[in-house]
Image: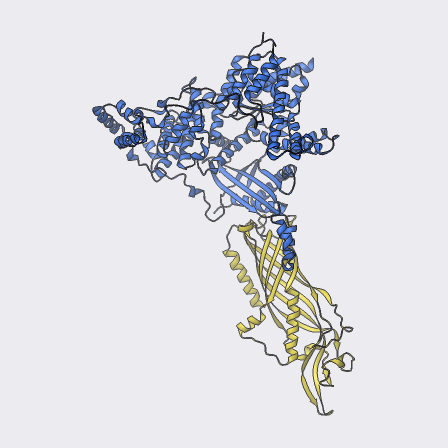
Chain colours: A blue, B yellow
Amino acid sequence: MRKLLLLLLTNCCILAASWSQQIDFENFTTLKSVGKIPEDFTTLASTKFKQDAAEIASENGREKADKEIFLLESNFLINEMLHSGRVIFGDPVTTYLNNIKAEILKANPELDDDIRIYTLLSNDVNAFTADNGIVLVTTGLVAQAQNEAEIAFILCHEFSHFYKKHAIDNYVENRKIERGIGVYSSLDNDAVDLEKFKYSKDLETEADVVGLSYYKKTKYSLNAAENVFDVLLYSYLPFNEITFPREYFNEGPYVLPGKLFLDTLASITAAEDYDDETSTHPNIKKRKTAITDGIGNFSNDERIDYLQDVADFNYVQKICRFQGCEMYLYDIEYENAIYQAFLLQQEDSSNLYLKNVIAQSLYGMSMYKNASASQEWHRYYKKVEGESQQLFYMGYKLNAKELNILALKYAWELYQTDSTNTALYKICVQLGDELVNENKIKTSEFLDAKATADYINKFQEQDSMSSLREVVTTDKPKTKYDKIKQEKAVPEENVEYWKFAFNKYIEDKAFLALLEEDVVINKKTKRKKSDGEYHLGLDEVVVVDPVYYSINEKLENPILYQDAEQAKIALKDKLKSNADELSLKLKYLDYHDLEANDTELFNDLSILNRWMNEKISHLGEEVFMHTSTNDEFLALSNKYNIDDFAWMGIVSFTEEEKYLVAKIALCIYFPIAPFLIADLVTPNRNTFFFTLVANAETGKLTMQYYNNTLQNDSHAVQMSNLYYILQQIKSKK
Amino acid sequence: MRLKIILVTAILSVITFTSKAQSPGYMGKKFIVKVELLTTPTFYKLNDINGYETYENVTSINGFGFSFTPSVGIEYVIGKGASAGIALRTSSLKMPMNYYELGSGYDEELEEYYTLGFVGETKLKTKMTSIYLKFYPHKKRGSIAPLGRFHQFELIVGGTTYQNGEVIITNQTDPNAQLVGAGDYQNYILYDDINELSFEEKIPIQMLKYAYGYETIIKDKIPIEMSMQIAFSVAESFAELTGNVVSYESYGEFLFYENLNDRFSRSLNITFNIGLGYLVF
């Protein structure tokens, strides 16, 4: 009894702690973890693997070996996921999910103890179960679920995956299929893949059936068990379908022309009975039917959609939907971010955070378009269904100059209402720079208030602004020849709607400062090192969670997880001794050093890793822009009182011998034999060192150093390279 | 000697001061003190003097052996991809038994002609100074000096002195000596000390060397290197360039120099080297 009371008290404390993290939706920031760090996050993957491997120690044969490989890989991959900055614990969403878990498993305390739920920050509508009992539920799922009961059914499905050990079972069976053992003999390649899909579908069906048995034991509505499949079917769409108004960005005479909008949007095509031959899950129709059959005549009386307060569900869902905006920005899905913000504005039209999301998104779209990278990243509008397609089309049709102007206009107007927002100001500065230096626009090309008034009057005399707009936007040509003729017939000045963009600000000195031609702030050349080396001249730096990978292509299981983990742990001392040699102050942040009470540090690492991941995504496309989390990064910099942060990594790689047969054959030619033998016996090993240093104040990468050395990752090679990296950080020109 | 030291120091200073400021070395340490051993297997042909097979039971030298050339030196890392060094090397070699004929004379008392010569083994002692540059392919292989594979280019200068070896034949009645110059003269006067032959006392050595090797560091302090080298003499070309071409007084003298150069070159032509050092600062 005392134990039960203690447990209740602990749960209440956790609940109180997480709910006490009241979300300020006006200044929303990415969800943070709360409370003590669970052991799942602080235990080394190798330790977890050893514990799991001990459980199968009595088994033997090939199956045991397969299981060991699975346990090794899964433990390391899950740890990597837990440390990615996208998995959180103790927050309101996780707490809410754990309350549902407690409700489902209240009659099954052993299973309740074994399963740990965490929240995965992702817009995918999904949940995952690891073999060790970790269940990750995405914020996307909570954002789209129609009620608590639907989430409960999904959790039941996931719990049955764990109970039935489906993950390891699937892995072992797949290996059997690949090897053609037993009933799988004489399968060709295509048949092997199909057999794997079939087995996966069998497991999913079983998870639905077993999950339903858990679900039936709860008080949740049985209708939700069927309706949840609609959520899954339409999960590729935003959480609502509302028409995005064409006039959303219009202001006075600044009117986006009709050619930027589609008259007819692509209809929603998702069907329940799709071909699932190459799917890991049965199609929705089959799953729905199976659940309906499983429910049979089971009574739905006294079953409800919410066992917790409805307001709690709405609150948690609102958080997840706001979080969705963050994740869209982070994942460089700017049109989706605007649409998500627009949907949320339906309930809170003046929300400053949502406006900021739109400003950030337009900024991102503009920067990508200016860098001619947008087509690589953004979904082609024809591949988008539903109301959000309008935004994809608009983004596609706006040219770089128009988009740049729209982004600057929106950001600057927002800055006028929130002049303390330094991140927004930095965006304005960069957009101004891009407008002048990339899109070659002169300030004089924009019309001031007087010129705008004259312009409007002129057309009012001729006709009216509305008729002008009609000509420009709605008079649809029927054929391509008509269209060409009409476009030529419209006076050019009529279509230059963008000239009205800044008529309110064109005499504002602060605004004009953005468009000064000599302010060049973002030239790629500034990033280049002058003599092949960096000289950052720093006295202190924060090293953020270095990475270490060890790969040997010659082995059947090429990724050497445990070796890499040990090497990473040893890296800390190596970096510190080199920093000492250079009198460089080094602060080292690593997930491996975390203890239960280091939640703040965990959150810091999550912010830093997300910042860098987003930065790398931009870099991959050669787009040099501020990340969406610059503010949080800057706050961390102030907290640590250090401006510069370094991300480092080492990848050790052993390649397979190339042209092996040819080399052996050539050995018969005696004079070159010694060289060939020497080459054959020497492993082809590379060690790749990389370091990225970012300055929080500017939000820019000040160092992007890479060295691929054709040597193994010996202690000496590591020390030599690490010293050289730190020397470049420390030294002045 | 003083001039050489000044020259070497000057060259190294220029290289050091003109190199890029940012040379990481190994954990900031760039100055290495080194010892090195050059070793090569040598095969001797012991029983062949001027076409006559002889002396195989007399010689003190084995038909097969190893030549060792130890050295001490200092090395300085001048950039990410290069280091420069100087080394002092010494070698002690044995030259197999040979016959050096110096000419002939006429003994008026005996009224007979005689031949002057020397039959015996010789010991060579060579002292060498060398300067070298080692290149670690930073751009191609990502090496950072002084770690990884390297190409070494070295200029070796020095001189060889010689003295009697273990076996000297002084008596023409020695059964082995009877075969020397068989058929021409019956009388010999054989010197018992090679230094009495009035050959040049110190024979200059100039060689160029290329080595390819691998260097690592253990305990963050001790560089270890292994390399293989090829070296060839440039003494002749150097003499021609400087106009100091040696003129030989006798065929014996010519043969002596030929043998000496051959013996010395063999000890450095192709060698396997192992070096050990200490990172000082």
Residue A183: % across, % down: 68, 30
Q: Residue furthest left?
A: A461
Q: How many marks?
A: 0
Residue B216: % across, % down: 63, 51
As rendered, which of A247 and A66 lies closer to the eye?
A66
Quarter holding the N terminus of chain B is bottom right
Rendered position, A689 above or below A167: below
Is residue A307 something that shows in the picture?
Answer: no
- From the viewer's perspective, is B251 left or right of A227? right
Residue B142: % across, % down: 55, 49
Which quadrant would residue A202 be assigned to in this image?
A: top right
Q: What's the residue at 51%, 40% (across, down)?
A: A692
Residue A435: % across, % down: 35, 35
Q: Residue furthest front?
A: A186
Which quadrant would residue A418 be assigned to in this image?
A: top left
As rendered, which of B2 and A505 lies closer to the eye?
A505
Is residue A484 something that shows in the picture?
Answer: yes
- From the viewer's perspective, is A433 left or right of A110? left
Which quadrant would residue A509 be assigned to in this image?
A: top left
Rendered position, B34 above or below A147: below
